[in-house]
Amino acid sequence: MLASQLHWRLLIGTIVILMAAAWIAPRFVPAPDIQENRVLAPAPATPHGLQDLDIFRKQADAYVADHFPIRRQLIGVLNRVRMLAGVSGSNRVIVGRDGWLFFDDDTHLGAARGDPPMQAGEIRTWLATLAGRTEYLRARGTPYLIVSPPVKETIYPQHGPAWYLGPSPNRPAIFLPRLAQASGAGEVVYLHSELAAATRRGDKTFSRHDTHWTGYGAYAGYVGLMTRLHGMGLAEAPLPVSAFQRVPNVGKGPRDLALMLGVSSFVDLDYPHFDTPPGLVSAQTTYLTAKHDWTAPQVIDTDKAGKPVLLMTRDSFSNELLPFLLPHFRRIIMAHNQDGFWRPDLIDRFKPDIVLLEVIEPGLRVGVGDGPPASPAALARIDRTLSRSGPQAAAPPLVPTLRPADAATVAQMAAAKPTDNCNVESAKVSRGDGQEATLTVSGWMSELGAKVTSPDGLLALGPPASPLVSPLKVDKARPDVAAYYKNPTGRESGFTGSFFIPKLPDGAYSPRIYRRAGAGWIVCTGKQPLSVP
C-alpha cells in the first residue's frame, strides 16, 4: 500500500515539476528563431452554449499546441537531433550530406532531376510565348531576355541526400535555352556554367542553410548576365569583384532553410554578401504602390546618366544580384514575379531599353505563362526545330512532320471507307519562312461500334495520289460524343495536334483523318478547305 502511494506521489510530483519547468525554462533558455510559414492557431472563441463545446475543445487544443511555452525550444532541439541523423523535421526541407539543407517544393528536387518531364505541347507553348514576347518588344526596339539562376543541388550535388543521383543533363533549364536559340524564339540565359566554374575555383556560391546564392554566387551570375548583355551591345562589361565591397556577416544572415527547421540557433551560419561601396554609385528608390517591402514594384534611379534603363521582373535571387547591377543602369524598374511575369503596363509606362525576367530554375518552365501571340513565321521556326528531335538526342520529335506517303500507305488510304461519324472542328495553316508551314487540327472520329479497334490514325493533306501524312492518335476524351450518340466507345474519339510541313506550295487543301476500324480503315474529310496563303 505504501509503495503504491509513493508511486503516485512521485508520478504527480514529476508531472508538476515538468509543467513548472515548461513555464520557467523560457525565462532562462532563449527560444531559437523559427519560421514556420504558417499562421499559428488563435485563441479559442468563448463558447455560448453546449453546442459550441466541441468546437471550443478543438480550437483550444490547437491553441495550446501552437503556444506551449517551450514549444520553440522543443522543436529546435528535436529537429537538430533529427538533422544529425539525416532526417528533416519539415516537409519543405531536405537534409543532405554534411549538414547541407535543400528546399523541397513538393517535387523532391524535381527541377534538377528533370521530373516531371515537360511534355511536347508544354514545350511548344513555352517557346511560342517566349517568341511572342520577344517579337512584341523587338517591334519597339527593346531586347528581351530570360535569366535563370540554378538551384544549389545542381551546383553542390555531392552534398545532396543519398537518394539524389545528381542533376539530369536533360532537365528543362538545359534544353529550353538550346531550343530557344535554335528556333530563334528568344534569349534565355541559364547561369549554371558560371556558378559551377566559380565553385570549382573555391568560391562559396551557396551556403549550407539557405536556399539562395551567396554574394559570390550572385557575382558569378552577374558576370554571366552582363557578359551576354555586353556581347549584344546593350551594356558595359562586368566589373571585377574588387570593385565591390565584401560585407561581414551582420547578425545571423540569410538562413531560410535552417529557420524552417528551427535549428538556426544551433548551427554555424556563413553567408558572404557584397554591396556597392561609397562612391561607386548613388541610388534612390521610389515605390510605385503603398507597399514598401522588397517585393513591391519600385524604381531605382542612379547617378549613372546616359546608361540604359532596365525593367526586371524578379524573384528573391535578385536581392544579392542587385548591388552588382546598379553601376550599369541609370534606372532599374523592378516588380516581383508574383504580380506577373509579363508586365506590358510597366513597359508602356517606363519605356525601358532592356526587359529582363529573372526566375529561379524551378520557375523557369512556368515563368512564361502569358504574353502576346507569336507570329506564324515564329511558330513555323519553332515547329521546324521541334520536328527534328526531342530534348534528348535519341528522343522522338516533339512536333510531328507531314511527309510524303509511301506506296503502301497510299493504297491503304485508298481502301478506307468514308464515315460521317466524325467532325474536323478546327483546321488552320500558318505559313512560316518560305514555303514552311504549321498545320493545327482538332476534332473527333469514332467507329461508334461495340468496341474501339485501335486509337491509331493518320492525318493527310494534299491530293489522294500523293498526300503528305503523319501518324495521329485518335484517343482524346470526348464525353460529349459518347453522350450524344449514347455509345460509350465515342468517349475515346478526340484528336488534336500541331504538324510541321517543310514545304507547302500555295493552293487549296482539305485535311483528311483516317482511323483503324475493324479490319480496315475509315476516313473523314474536313468540310472547310484551307487556302494557302
Image (tube, rainbow, N blue to C red):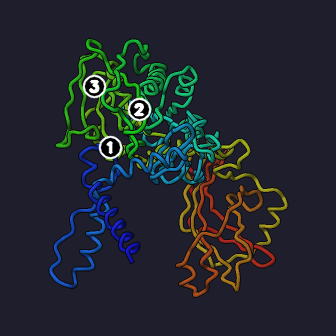
For residue 331, the mark is: 3
Q: Residue at x 32, y 22 (%)?
A: 326
Of 230 and 318, nearer the camera is 318
Q: What's the distance in space between the residues labelled 2 and 1, CA to CA? A: 13 Å
The image shows residue 87, relative to residue 173, as above or below, that is below
Q: Nearer the viewer, residue 148 or 275?
A: 275
- Residue 173, position in %: x, y? 55, 40
On the rendered image, what quadrant is the N terminus found in?
bottom left
Q: Helix or strand or loop: what does disc 1 sit on?
A: loop
Quickly name the residue at label 1: 33
Does the residue at mark 2 contact the one at mark 1 (Cβ under 8 Å)? no
Q: Amino acid at mark 1?
A: Asp
* Image: 508 above or below 226: below
Which residue is the extreme one toward the bottom?
486
- Of residues 268 and 441, which is closer to you in this image? 268
Q: For mark 2, what is the residue?
A: 269
Residue drawn at (74%, 62%) of the image: 464
Q: Nearer the viewer, residue 170 or 216?
A: 216
The residue located at (33%, 21%) in the rendering is 275
Residue 141 tag number: none
Q: Cβ–Cβ below 8 Å for labels 3 and 2?
A: no
Residue 240 visible in the picture: yes
Residues packed near mark 3 inside 10 Å, few (<14), some (14 to 19) or many (20 plus): many
Q: Residue furthest right?
A: 408
